[in-house]
């Protein structure tokens, strides 16, 4: 689940380093979550998470990964604006967004799906975050020529208002089902070979996030302290609106929260926000946390920033490498050690998930750092798509 930068990181510009550092941070959280999916087979969680059966440690492990997609989609918008400034304006950004979006959609249904299933014709194809980012880029290509106030209005209306569409459902086989499944209502689409595609990431809310990311792009031409101040104000406003919506408990998320048997369970219920598609409350929480982290990383020690940039400087490459690494490692463990939970090999507890993710992060990070350097040195035109 992630995006890719539109422009190569500029090592000498700390604000750009902070963008890649934030990408790197959420990439590591994504790695933990995908380690859970690959190696915690006997205790998977649903979405939204079932508080009656999920332990707090597993709940908060999953919750931490909710930062990933919103941060990457928002930074895709920011990077699009920065790319346009270097390449000739909104027209240049639009052209690149369109072509890059098509490339990501094709990548999702080929290398990404094969990395998860190791099947050329799987029974179920998951259209996930790479696909959603690709389509969001294509949509953003059509929006970037809008005046900035209009773009902000479009982004806010989509982000805050799309839950008004929740009651609308179109049955499978009815006219418009495929389009609505792609836009807003997570569903299944029949494929020519008899399989099905699941639109795990309906794209309408993500278009709003990408548009707002593009709209704040000019902040990255400001002085550092002015930018940090705006990011903090934005985060405070989003969190205040989230608090109001959760207090009212009538709009903002399809699943209202309810008091639990303990204060911890109540907190978990409040934070149990819908990701598929991302509710207004989900996006307010994750994007505000992302803004706080981005502001903080601009003042982080250079050594920490450099480590995180190693993971976030070539995120598409890291995404592919970590998927294949996790699934090949799982197959290897199954072949050598045998199944220990039914037909699967699974680690025993949540702490083991984090430990295994830390081990896998090292070779994946080194490979990503190598590829990032190669990409920055290369003059080949096609390297900017990777």
Image: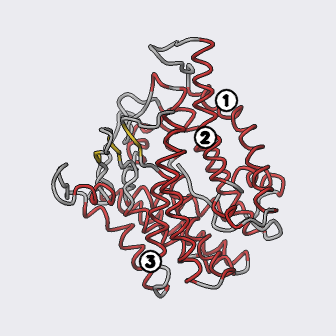
For the residue carrying disc 3, how many other residues have a C-alpha within 10 Å: few (<14), some (14-19), or many (20+)? some
The disc, 3 or 2, on the residue closer to the chain's N-terminal end is: 2
For the residue carrying disc 2, how many other residues have a C-alpha within 10 Å: few (<14), some (14-19), or many (20+)? many
The disc, 3 or 1, on the residue closer to the chain's N-terminal end is: 3
| Comparing labels 1 and 2, the label whose residue is closer to the camera | 2
Spatial CA span between label 3 and label 1: 43 Å
Identify the element where label 3 is drawn. helix
Residue 13 shown left or right of residue 234 in the figure: right
| Comparing labels 3 and 2, the label whose residue is closer to the camera | 3
Image x and y of residue 162, in percent: 31, 65
The residue under the point 63% across, 32% down is 354
363 shown above or below 292: above
The disc, 1 or 2, on the residue closer to the chain's N-terminal end is: 2
- Identify the residue position indicated by label 3 in the image: 142
The residue under the point 33% across, 55% down is 253
- Identify the residue position indicated by label 2 in the image: 31
């Amino acid at each position: 689940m992630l995006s890719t930068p539109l422009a190569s990181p500029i090592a000498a510009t700390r604000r750009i380093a902070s963008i890649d550092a934030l990408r790197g941070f959420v990439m590591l959280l994504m790695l933990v979550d995908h380690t859970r999916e690959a190696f915690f087979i006997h205790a998977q969680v649903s979405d939204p998470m079932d508080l009656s059966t999920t332990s707090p440690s597993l709940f908060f492990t999953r919750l931490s990964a909710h930062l990933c997609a919103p941060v990457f989609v928002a930074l895709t918008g920011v990077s699009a604006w920065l790319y346009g400034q270097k390449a000739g304006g909104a027209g240049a950004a639009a052209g690149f967004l369109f072509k890059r979006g098509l490339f990501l959609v094709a990548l999702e249904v080929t290398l990404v799906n094969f990395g998860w299933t190791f099947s050329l014709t799987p029974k179920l194809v998951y259209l996930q975050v790479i696909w959603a980012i690709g389509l969001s880029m294509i949509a953003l290509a059509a929006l970037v020529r809008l005046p900035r106030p209009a773009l902000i209005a479009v982004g806010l209306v989509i982000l805050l208002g799309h839950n008004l569409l929740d009651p609308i459902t179109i049955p499978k086989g009815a006219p418009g089902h495929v389009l609505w499944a792609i836009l807003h209502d997570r569903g299944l689409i029949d494929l020519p070979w008899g399989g099905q595609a699941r639109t795990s990431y309906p794209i309408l809310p993500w278009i709003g996030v990408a548009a707002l990311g593009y709209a704040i792009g000019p902040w990255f031409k400001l002085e550092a302290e002015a930018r940090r101040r705006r990011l903090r104000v934005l985060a405070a406003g989003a969190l205040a609106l989230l608090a109001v919506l959760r207090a009212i408990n009538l709009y903002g998320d399809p699943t209202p929260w309810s008091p639990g048997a303990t204060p911890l369970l109540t907190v978990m219920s409040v934070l149990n926000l819908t990701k598929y598609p991302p509710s207004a409350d989900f996006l307010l929480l994750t994007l505000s946390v992302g803004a706080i982290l981005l502001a903080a990383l601009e003042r982080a020690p250079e050594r920490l920033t450099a480590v995180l940039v190693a993971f976030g400087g070539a995120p598409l490459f890291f995404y592919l490498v970590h998927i294949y690494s996790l699934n090949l490692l799982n197959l290897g463990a199954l072949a050598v050690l045998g199944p220990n939970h039914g037909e699967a090999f699974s680690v025993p507890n949540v702490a083991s998930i984090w430990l295994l993710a830390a081990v896998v992060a090292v070779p994946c990070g080194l490979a990503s750092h190598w590829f990032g350097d190669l990409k920055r040195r290369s003059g080949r035109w096609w390297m900017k798509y990777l």
